[in-house]
């Protein structure tokens, strides 16, 4: 027999909020999350924005999506997509309500930190051949040494032909590596600050050490490597000038922990949100409002460029889509709501001093909603209004989805932004939501399967909700 609750306990339940692991009150959650994350791990094998777009488009086509044709007034239930240069993607399901009532938008990014090749990457030193790199996005450079790397990208030939490169992902493929100094000789290196322990110009990828056997040739190893690339792809050294190649961790996505409760993989920032919103988009059937799901490129370098969220491609799509119904984009966007889906920092007890535990997110407690991001005095932040927060809260609570609220870390310790500020510029009510991540931007990021699945449920609830704004 349970003891009777005291007046204080009753008041506490009524007035104070308490967070607990969502599976404590929902025993079926763990199994559902595990099942959902099998598909997620398959999605994570696409490690660049180009691979994510290509793979997603083929999924969309299999599921009845057709390429968006500007000027068409699509009937409710129609599923369409628009690709931008093979690096960004917009998908939509036309709702039952008039487009004039606004859209329900979910935006995430599909680029992740990595080592991009320089335009003239190939060189030989000490009878070893290397590719020179220029890192892309915010990385701790020392984390990228002494781990297996795979090569990805495209080479565009002068005659217009495009050659796809992907080495190091399949069984039997070779992998590549950036070397590090042995501890025995690292006395001086170990005294350096972490940002200088390995410097940008030391991030050279080792690709071979076998010579081309001809005494008359000076750079024998380099020539041998170029010969192998020519055999495989038909390219010569000059073709690197019109290429986009990069190295990423070659690890396969894996279950982490004895309980298998987590996913460990490269690129979960922000493939986790991309996959969750993609599944919500695909499963949207006759939604009340038109859903629009966006995969953006270039978030990790500031959203610039014509495939980044600062590009007008999103605005142009809304303009083209709305004009077929006799509407203007600005009127539709003003009535719309957007979830900016991106990861957040999970509290890590090993580095507990950077987190303010009352306002940070915890692994396993569900998706994290952030009213604002940014740094210092809320610089470069979207800062969702109380009304918009209330609107989203109503949808999540109404659908019984556990979630948490949090910001990145302690106020003066650093900070970071998302594409929420690039989206809200369209006079669009926007809220940040995402999955807490451990070891963000490292070669092996960690997420909780429960959080991944609950983010999908959250975006689904948002897409299927009939709730009206204001
Ligand atoms: Mn991100
Ligand atoms: Mn990031």
Image (spheres, helix red, strand yellow):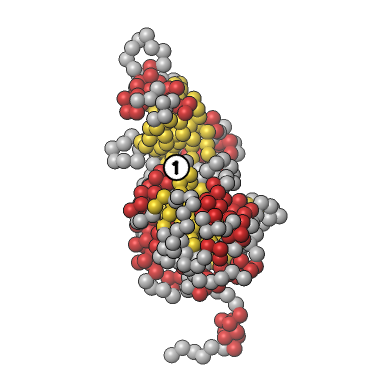
Looking at the image, which residue is at 56% across and 63% down? 100
Vertical arrangement, residue 364 with respect to residue 215, above or below: below
- Does residue 428 show up? no
Question: Residue 91: horizontal and vertical position, in percent?
Answer: 45, 54
Question: Residue 154: horizontal and vertical position, in percent?
Answer: 42, 34
Image quadrant containing the N terminus: bottom left
As drawn, the residue found furthest toward the right would be: 377
Residue 34 occupies quadrant: bottom left
User: In this rendering, would 403 be left or right of 172?
Assistant: right
Looking at the image, which residue is at 39% across and 69% down? 29
User: In this rendering, would 24 be left or right of 103?
Assistant: left
As drawn, the residue found furthest toward the top would be: 216
Question: Residue 81: horizontal and vertical position, in percent?
Answer: 44, 52
**In what element is the residue under mark 1?**
loop
User: In this rendering, would 446 be left or right of 432?
Assistant: left
Q: Which residue is tagged 1? A: 86
Image quadrant containing the C terminus: bottom right
Question: Residue 407: horizontal and vertical position, in percent?
Answer: 60, 59
> Residue 172 or 288: which is nearer the viewer?
288
Vertical arrangement, residue 377 with respect to residue 21, above or below: above
> Residue 97 or 81: which is nearer the viewer?
97
Looking at the image, which residue is at 35% across and 41% down? 169
């Amino acid at each position: 027999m349970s003891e009777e609750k005291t007046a204080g306990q009753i008041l506490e339940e009524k007035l104070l909020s308490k967070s607990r692991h969502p599976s404590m009150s929902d025993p079926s959650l763990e199994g559902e999350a595990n099942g959902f994350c099998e598909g997620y791990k398959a999605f994570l094998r696409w490690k660049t924005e180009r691979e994510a777009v290509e793979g997603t488009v083929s999924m969309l086509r299999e599921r009845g999506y057709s390429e968006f044709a500007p000027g068409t007034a699509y009937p409710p239930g129609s599923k369409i997509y628009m690709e931008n240069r093979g690096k960004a993607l917009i998908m939509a399901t036309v709702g039952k309500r008039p487009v004039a009532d606004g859209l329900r938008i979910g935006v995430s990014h599909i680029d992740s930190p990595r080592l991009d090749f320089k335009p003239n990457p190939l060189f030989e030193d000490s009878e070893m051949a290397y590719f020179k790199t220029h890192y892309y996005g915010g990385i701790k450079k020392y984390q990228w040494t002494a781990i297996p790397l795979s090569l990805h990208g495209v080479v565009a030939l002068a005659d217009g032909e495009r050659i796809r490169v992907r080495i190091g992902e399949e069984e039997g493929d070779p992998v590549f590596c950036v070397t590090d100094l042995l501890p025995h000789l690292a006395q001086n290196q170990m005294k350096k600050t972490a940002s200088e322990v390995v410097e940008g110009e030391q991030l050279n990828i080792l690709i071979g050490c076998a010579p081309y056997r001809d005494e008359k040739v000076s750079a024998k190893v380099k020539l041998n490597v170029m010969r192998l690339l020519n055999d495989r792809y038909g390219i010569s050294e000059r073709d690197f000038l019109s290429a986009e190649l990069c190295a990423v961790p070659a690890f396969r996505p894996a279950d982490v922990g004895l309980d298998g409760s987590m996913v460990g993989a490269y690129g979960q920032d922000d493939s986790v949100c991309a996959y969750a919103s993609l599944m919500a988009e695909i499963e949207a059937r006759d939604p009340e409002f038109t859903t629009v799901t966006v995969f953006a490129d270039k978030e990790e370098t500031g959203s610039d460029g014509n495939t980044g969220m600062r590009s007008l491609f999103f605005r142009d799509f809304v303009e083209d889509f709305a004009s077929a119904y006799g509407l203007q984009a600005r009127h539709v966007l003003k009535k719309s709501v957007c979830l900016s889906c991106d990861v957040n920092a999970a509290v890590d007890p090993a580095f507990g001093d950077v987190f303010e535990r009352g306002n940070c997110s915890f692994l396993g407690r569900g998706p994290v909603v952030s009213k604002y991001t940014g740094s210092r005095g809320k610089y470069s932040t979207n800062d969702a209004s109380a009304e918009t927060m209330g609107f989203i809260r109503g949808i999540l609570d109404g659908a019984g989805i556990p979630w948490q609220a949090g910001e990145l870390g302690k106020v003066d310790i650093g900070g970071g932004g998302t594409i929420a500020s690039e989206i809200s510029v369209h006079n669009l009510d926007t809220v940040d939501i995402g999955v807490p991540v451990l070891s963000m931007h490292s070669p092996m990021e960690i997420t909780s399967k429960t959080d991944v699945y609950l983010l999908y449920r959250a975006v689904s609830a948002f897409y299927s909700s009939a709730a009206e704004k204001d």
